């Protein structure tokens, strides 16, 4: 009796980097991780130093099976995360959006975004800030600039309401993480990468 060949559907899961900035919304990023894992992604979380302050690092490391990175590695150190197939920065703060558009890579998430763009990776940005900061002309210009580069930017009243200054938790539990994942799915599909659990 001959042995059945092994299943050919054993394809590697696409790797999604979730880049997190300093915002109260970041406390719930585990919801995005859960949604992405259910869709079949291998998820890695990378946070800015201010983003890290909002995270439950041990819980996210246990949830993803990967360390939560914040700092650039030392020269000669091995990579501890698999290379990404797509990047989503959510929530993306005014600071990160403006530095990203200017090509500044002074945090690991910014370095990954700049390098990811150069590699042609699908990138989704989900900016979230307060109403007053969102009115800054440079922030608005930079959102337009990112869109012109092919970054999928999820922003506007039709996406999510912004809180007044000092009220960052106002819409925290209503933050539509699923929109970010849907946009990543679309970008990967356009790139010919099959997604789905």
Image (cartoon, grey):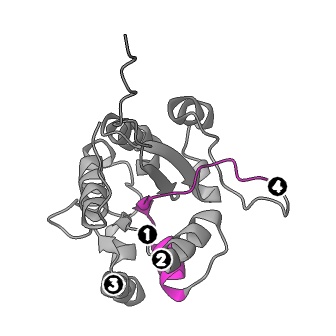
Q: Quadrant of the C terminus?
A: top left
Quadrant (top left/top right/bottom left/bottom right) for the N terminus: top left
Instruction: Nearest to the eye among marks 1 and 3: give it.
Output: 1
Separation of residues labelled 4 and 3 (CA atoms): 38 Å
Q: Is residue 110 magenta?
A: no
**Mark 3 vs mark 2: which is more N-terminal?**
2
Q: CA distance from mark 1 to mark 3?
A: 23 Å
Magenta stretch holds residue 99: yes
Give SS at disc 2. helix
Disc 2 to disc 1: CB gap under 8 Å: yes
Disc on the earlier residue, 1 or 4 = 4
CA neighbours of label 3 inside 10 A, class few (<14), some (14 to 19), many (20+): some
Front position in the image: 5 or 31: 5
User: Toward the viewer: 107 or 41?
Assistant: 41
Which residue is under mark 1?
121
- Labelled disc at residue 140: 3
Q: Earlier in the sequence, mark 2 or mark 4?
A: 4
Estimate the spatial distance between the alpha carbons at disc 2 and disc 1, rounded to whole Å. 6 Å
Q: Assess disc 2: are there few (<14), some (14-19) or many (≥20) residues with their C-alpha within 10 Å of its C-alpha.
A: some
- Residue in the image at 38% along x and 37% along y: 37
Check disc 2 and report the residue beneath it: 117
Question: What whole-number distance in Å separates the C-alpha atoms at marks 1 and 4?
Answer: 24 Å
How far apart marks 2 and 4 lie (CA) works out to 24 Å
| Residues at marks 3 and 2, CA–CA distance in whole angstroms | 20 Å
Task: Place residue 91 in its image quadrant.
Answer: bottom left
**Residue ID at (39%, 68%):** 123
Identify residue for label 4.
77
Q: Residue at x 53, y 46 (%)?
A: 44
Write down the region rendered in magenta: 77-102
Q: Give percent across and percent down for residue 42.
A: 46, 42
């Amino acid at each position: 009796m001959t042995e059945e060949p092994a299943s050919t559907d054993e394809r590697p899961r696409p790797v999604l980097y979730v880049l997190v900035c300093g915002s109260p919304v970041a406390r719930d990023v585990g919801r995005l991780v859960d949604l992405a894992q259910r869709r079949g992604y291998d998820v890695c979380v990378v946070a800015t130093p201010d983003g890290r302050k909002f995270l439950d690092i041990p819980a996210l490391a246990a949830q993803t099976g990967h360390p939560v990175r914040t700092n650039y590695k030392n020269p000669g150190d091995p990579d501890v995360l698999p290379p990404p197939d797509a990047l989503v920065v959510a929530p993306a703060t005014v600071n990160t959006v403006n530095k990203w558009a200017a090509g500044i890579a002074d945090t690991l998430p910014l370095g990954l975004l700049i390098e990811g763009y150069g590699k042609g990776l699908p990138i989704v940005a989900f900016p979230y800030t307060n109403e007053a900061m969102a009115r800054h002309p440079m922030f608005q210009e930079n959102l337009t600039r990112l869109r012109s580069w092919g970054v999928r930017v999820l922003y506007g009243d039709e996406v999510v309401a912004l809180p007044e200054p000092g009220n960052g938790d106002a819409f925290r539990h209503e933050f539509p993480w699923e929109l970010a994942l849907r946009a990543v799915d679309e970008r990967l599909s356009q790139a010919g990468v099959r997604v789905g659990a």
